[in-house]
Amino acid sequence: MEEWRKNKKSFAVFMIPATAWLVLFFTIPIGILWIYSFGERGPQGQTYLAFSFANYARAVEWIHLGILWKSMWMAGVTTVVCILLGFPLALGIAFAPQKYKNPLLLLIIIPFWTNLLIRTYAWIAVLRSKGFLNFGLEWLHDKMDYALTTVGLGSALGAFEPVQFLYNQQAVIVGLVYVYLPFMILPLYASLEKLDKRYLEASLDLGAGHWRTLFSVTVPLISPGIASGVILTFILALGSYLTPNLLGGTDSMMIGNLIAHEFMAARDWPFGSALSFLLMYGAFLAIWLKSTIETRAAAQRERS
Amino acid sequence: MTIFSHLSATPVKYRRRLINPLDYTRRLWLQLTVGFGLLFLYAPLVALVAFSFNDSKRNIVWQGFTFKYYAKAFNNSGLHDAFMNSMIIASISTVVSTVLGTLLAIGLARYKFKGKALYDGWVHLPVVIPEICLGVAMLAFFVWANIPLGLTTITISHIAFSIPFVAVIVRSRMAGFDRSYEEAAIDLGATPWKIFWDITFPYLTPGIVAAALLAFTLSIDDFVITFFTSGPGSTTFPIKIYSMVRFSVTPEVNAASTILIALTVILTVAAMLVQGRGEKGMKK
Amino acid sequence: MTNQNKKPPIIEVRNLIKRFGETAIAVNDVSLDIYEGEFFALLGPSGCGKTTLLRMLAGFENPSEGLISIGGKDMVGVDPSLRPVNMVFQSYAVFPHMTVAQNVGYGLKVTGVAPREIDLRVTEALELVKLEGYGTRLPNQLSGGQQQRVALARALIKRPKVLLLDEPLSALDAKLREQMQLELVRLQKSVGITFVIVTHDQDEALSMADRIAVMSKGRVEQLATPAELYEYPSNRFVADFIGKTNIFSATVVGRDGKSLLVDVPQLGRMALPFEGDAQGEISLAIRPEKLRLEAHVASGDKVSVKGKVQQLAYYGGESHVHLDCASGMSLSVTRPNGHRGSYQDVIVGEEAFICWDSADMLVLTH
């Protein structure tokens, strides 16, 4: 590592272009947003500069608080489902024979590379009233109807009514789980992989069963990885826009959708900016939490 | 007198394969769970791709294999224009962000300065901030600066969020670089520029190529930020698909989606291979 | 080679084979018996299969073929948690997120022992390994040697029939290692259970074990007491692996009653006491400490060869002298430095006669 002063010209060549771009087209926009968050909305939707906290106050008003809480609820449920589905998957990869590990990991990641829009759209085809799920249910219904008819209970089931799977909270959660599952699996896999399997062997040797070993030894020892996955999944799900937009209905508006609404239809940019910053602060808090946990875990590993 | 004395002298072979206690993945229940998980991950995508070839408007019942929806998609002028727009934006964004990001990565790897940790954190912010916030911030900026929304604004935004990704990838490639090669060259009298082009740059090439491929993918795939910085006549491929999706679910949309999937997967696989091959080259 | 006692063995292994994949065989048809109360060692270079064998006894690997019984019961396919054995791992595997007391009591807690009894037995176990008062400490506050004692206490508290130890002393420094060697033997005698250790360090095995199985490439080369192994190695590998040896070739020419007649290059014809079957080319071995350096040719039954000192290695209590002899033979002599200054008796470049008693020579048929 050189001290920059020694070679000021080189230093400038390397650092200035990217820095200039990011200052101009990243920091300034964020700064403008920040200033707007203290502003006021004019009658035709213009933004007047002011020094008011009114927007932030509005954000925690009852109706908006509802959306915030609902977003956190949906992000929370998503995270829980991701843990329940992701942990066995991470376990399956971590304990697979060596030659299968990378292929399995790749298999998990490939869907992640595809476009978010398309991943979400794929679920529309599955969940809508003329979608695969209802198609399957209808098939089942018809088969059962047929069976009952032969027994003489012809119209016991009645006509098939497609189930409303789409445009509600459940659909959004399914979509979010689908999109963010890899973010849970990867940290879990990484920490399971690094775990010294001798600890598990010692636990079994001492008389503990496999489930006991899981809860008394494995989980405590990978808790930083679990925390990482949970925090990451939660904060990403919380900030999502496209998935609730495509899969959700009137009861499943999330913070991202509200922000978009304020910037488009409602034309209340100051309020939208305030909401954006609340979301950003949340994201920063989560990242800080995550890195603190990780550094503490690394330090502990150094000591022992 | 042992417990085995009643057994014959022939060796005992184990017919059913005994599973070691920690070989969890050999156990059926875990295999089923992993299988179900993979099914969950792939079924919707496979269905989507499969039904792009379905000869039926209804999209559920399989009625025959056809390419006609791909033809339809290719002939759709809206889709075609959007695709071209995406390509143009992605190309420019890739070139600029790769150059800027690579320079930044080398600078960060080579120099130390006061406040570097803070600077480092700031440079990585675009990765951390939720896309919706970035999108509306860019919108607010362009409106305030009186720049009309269009291909330019989209490209500018794409470059901005691609730079940190490029920097991260190139920097991790830099980490494996042995400075003593450079120092040997200085010792032999080479100028800084020569050293850069003859030694540093060739080593970095796999990382730079991988980063460029990633930047291209990020640009093509982006929806949220593009949505807020696009104007009339500057639709990109994902945005066009979005508007088609809002309208209805048709095999044509599936076809367009499949094209996008194929593109992304190919690019990402290429990036991985390039990075993998780079690992085998000059190492510390 | 001698049967320890007339009681049935506590561990019986019959024709045990372990294959990894299609080609690798880690354990290749091993059969042995281990008796109750023994301190038994599995000794060999890395890759000889000793650790795999130990892990099969513990239950972490399943054999490809063969039988294992512990305490009279067939153990193949039995879960490690159900076996009457406990293991001390090479890296100790002391749970980092639990205190010493929680670690030691873990094995009792998971089998449903009452908390009050757990406390009592934990205190007892900590006393046994001389770690009284360390109960509330965390493993990262302990030294390597202390962690090992926690691992020992944790295993012994379960009162297993057999304690398995995987390279228990390899992570310790030399001084501590010597201490722990004595400590482990003392512990074993006071607790009275069978100890089976795996080690690659022959000094360790020789000084601690009652019987040793020397292994190489998945097979047991020789199973005997330390003294038998050292004084009567059954083949070249064992002679070479245990202690140092001088080895040279010879040709069998016949027998003379209880002695074998051999022709040795440079030494001529010798009659060596050997009752086994031997023909053709064989190896002869002699331990370096059985050789003497003399200024003049020996008389009587002693064999002597002239040689020139090439190298001297000083070890404080003894010196190792390496000499080259006429026919290209090299010999190593271990000379005790019996008096102050006696290490200076021999100097490099000097010529001397190496003498020994032919009865001290070993005949190795393979």
Image (cartoon, helix red, strand yellow):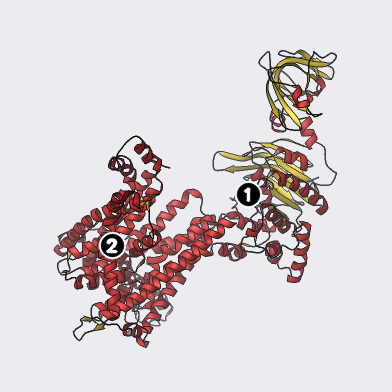
The kind of residue on which mark 2 rests is Leu
Residue at image position (29%, 49%) is A10
The label shown at residue C111 is: none
- Residue A130 image point, x, y percent: 30, 73
Q: Nearer the viewer, residue C58 or A142?
A: C58
Horizontal side of C116 relative to B144 (left or right) equals: right
Q: Chain of mark 2?
A: A
Question: Picture quarter containing residue B84?
Answer: bottom left
Q: Quick check: C88 above or below B197?
A: below
Residue sitting at 14 percent across and 63 percent down? B77
Judged by depth in the image, the label closer to the viewer, 1 or 2, is: 2
Relative vertical location of residue B53 with respect to residue C355 in this rendering, above or below: below
* Secondary structure category for the residue under label 1: loop
Q: Which of these two is toward me, C169 or B33? A: C169
- Chain to which the residue tagged by mark 1 belongs: C
B149 or A142, nearer to the observer: B149
Q: Which residue is mark 2?
A: A22
Residue shown at the point (48%, 48%) measured from the top left: A99
